[in-house]
């Protein structure tokens, strides 16, 4: 299977990226009470959940994409590596947003987080559009309606991520809330499209 | 296989979560003697072993569950992601409990640990109950006695975890000891049920 | 395959444990020159290589063992979890020995490292002896000469590890050198036995 | 399959090494503004991308190599472990180069990075040359033109890495740029050779 190497590489990166998100949590040091500290870092829990959901959904979608791909070429390889480089990077802006949303330069933190997710979405869209254009890399036995369904489900991705990022210019917390809403929307729509069933 | 994607995602998260538990151990800095420091951090070793056992057992059980599942739907996907989010989070309360049990706010540390494991157990139970209800997602060729055996083995989970968590209000150390006992009980019962053989 | 779950669990833990060994290296901070710092931490490089080799060899051997196992029972499950708990723990004593061998309490550091590896070897030996005793868990189609070969190759393990650990009472550096020698010996003997070919 | 154990071991190490590169990024502490800090650490982003690409390409190439290998022997096992030890080590010099290129001892940092990648390339070349010499370990059904193609594609590796390392004596930044160029070259040539298709 010519694309199985790419899939194995990708699976590993997705699984590890999602699991090392927890390393962003710092152990509270003395001073304030532990219960106060643990409650006080609520943005960390939200950032953790949003990034976990977002990467998890991308993994599911990536599998859906790869099942339709018949072969890979140079550009597809480039775009996959770009996508994975973004996915593996997500734990860093997650830690930044968790650290700065409750105090400090919230706007920069939210923008940094949003730009990372938007860039990830751009690579993911470019990868699919490149593969699906005139069925360039689509497997011969692929179901055209499934291919069209994936194309349709990818359409709102970049605009939604870019919009949520720009929302940080008005309200960093609203921006994070929008990313949470997108993640929940994708879990729902993913199933509605019948692709997880 | 419609559920194999979920299983691969889950396997990766379980294996990585269990292995990064070790990152909670800090290298002792000067001052006291090294041997004193290494002995003094005994709660870290116990917390490490309990969390390792608990996640390991959940992995084994998750495989048992997935072999009975014929297909997945939206709610099942939601519950699996919730379960994995909890499992991947365990290294953090493990580090907290290791740091604070020997001094500081023991009760909060033990409660934080217990709440995490109880939430994990709730997601795991909800996932199985949702799938097994009227055989909703059970594979057609599943053995009814195996399905009933899993249901039976899941029953004591949440009450035991919740009880062990509440024990922290009386004694944080007793709470940790109860979680250790549950882990050992599950390793034993798991085999007694014949599912690991 | 009844033992495939255990193998998948084990494979993940071995691979991750070996790769997070690198996290023990700290980035030098100002003061001394970088080249001096990088050369000065030579014990870290040796500890990294020895632990990498040791875990790598155990992974290879674990696969050899599992190919001979026909089924698992409660005790085997217990022993496997104990073995993996030790393997996943190795990065911590590795970091300790790297930190303290060039200064500080070398003896305690080397003893801590040696005790961890010896405990790992004990679990590994117990696991195999339990399985091989009267062919308790050995697959029906297993080649008796291969089973006997594994038993023979396991015999020197615990004495060699225990001896190298005790050597730390005389010379911590000699102890580390002995562990390096054992690792190289196993890579060689492993192939001499024809099991990697 | 006698080489599948080695491949599984290798796959895990490659995937994890590439994903923990992100742990080199430190969360900025107060003082300067966050946006300034995030922009100021541009060398970290470049070092991250170069190491990610380099390890990713080595993974793809390693799979290509293993598909041609029919069996393994002692020396091949030694060389594979040496290769993986280098690959798993890459996150450390990556963090060093990211920290020191924008200030401090740039030359040592770039040399340390270059020596690591050159050593990795040497092990990779030695591994392939050993296996391909007189078709020593090549599978009987291997296509001679594919074997010759791999040999041809490996030839420029070590000289290019060594040259880029030595360039650090003149300009550390130029050295890093050369490693980036090599990575991009390999992604391109890899596809031109048709091995990713």
Image (tube, coloured by chain):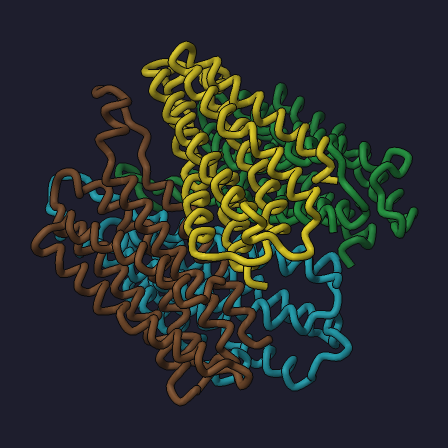
Chain colours: A brown, B yellow, C green, D cyan
Considering the image in quadrants, where does the C terminus of chain B appear? top right
Can see residue D40? no
Question: C173 or C60, which lies in front?
Answer: C60
User: Could you tell whether C197 is left or right of B11 in the image?
Assistant: right
Considering the image in quadrants, where does the N terminus of chain B appear? bottom right
In the depicted structure, whether residue D33 falls above or below residue D39: above
User: Could you tell whether A96 is left or right of A151 in the image?
Assistant: left
- Residue B3 in the image: x percent, y percent? 55, 58
Query: What residue appears at the point 69 percent right and 61 percent down from the top-left corner?
Result: D4
In the depicted structure, whether residue D4 falls above or below residue B51: below
Query: What residue appears at the point 43 percent right and 52 percent down from the top-left corner?
Result: B75
- Residue B37 in the image: x percent, y percent? 45, 17
User: Could you tell whether D39 is left or right of D130 in the image?
Assistant: left
Query: What residue appears at the point 18 percent right and 59 percent down from the top-left corner?
Result: A164
- Residue C11 in the image: x percent, y percent? 62, 48
- Residue D186 in the image: x percent, y percent? 45, 75
Toward the front, the furthest residue is B134
In the depicted structure, whether residue B124 falls above or below residue A64: above
Indicate the quadrant where residue D94 lies.
bottom left
């Amino acid at each position: 299977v010519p694309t199985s190497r790419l899939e194995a590489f990708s699976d590993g990166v997705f699984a590890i990226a999602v699991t090392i998100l927890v390393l962003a949590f710092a152990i509270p040091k003395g001073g304030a009470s532990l219960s106060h500290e643990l409650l006080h870092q609520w943005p960390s829990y939200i950032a953790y959940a949003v990034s976990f959901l977002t990467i998890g959904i991308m993994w599911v979608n990536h599998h859906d994409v790869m099942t339709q791909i018949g072969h890979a070429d140079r550009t597809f390889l480039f775009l996959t590596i770009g996508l994975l480089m973004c996915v593996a990077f997500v734990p860093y802006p997650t830690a930044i947003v968790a650290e700065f949303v409750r105090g400090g330069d919230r706007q920069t933190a939210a923008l940094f987080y949003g730009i990372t997710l938007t860039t990830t979405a751009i690579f993911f869209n470019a990868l699919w559009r490149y593969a699906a254009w005139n069925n360039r890399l689509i497997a011969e036995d692929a179901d055209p309606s499934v291919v069209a369904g994936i194309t349709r489900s990818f359409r709102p991705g970049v605009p939604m991520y870019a919009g949520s990022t720009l929302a940080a210019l008005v309200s960093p917390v609203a921006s994070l809330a929008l990313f949470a809403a997108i993640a929940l929307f994708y879990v729902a729509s993913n199933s509605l499209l019948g692709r997880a069933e």
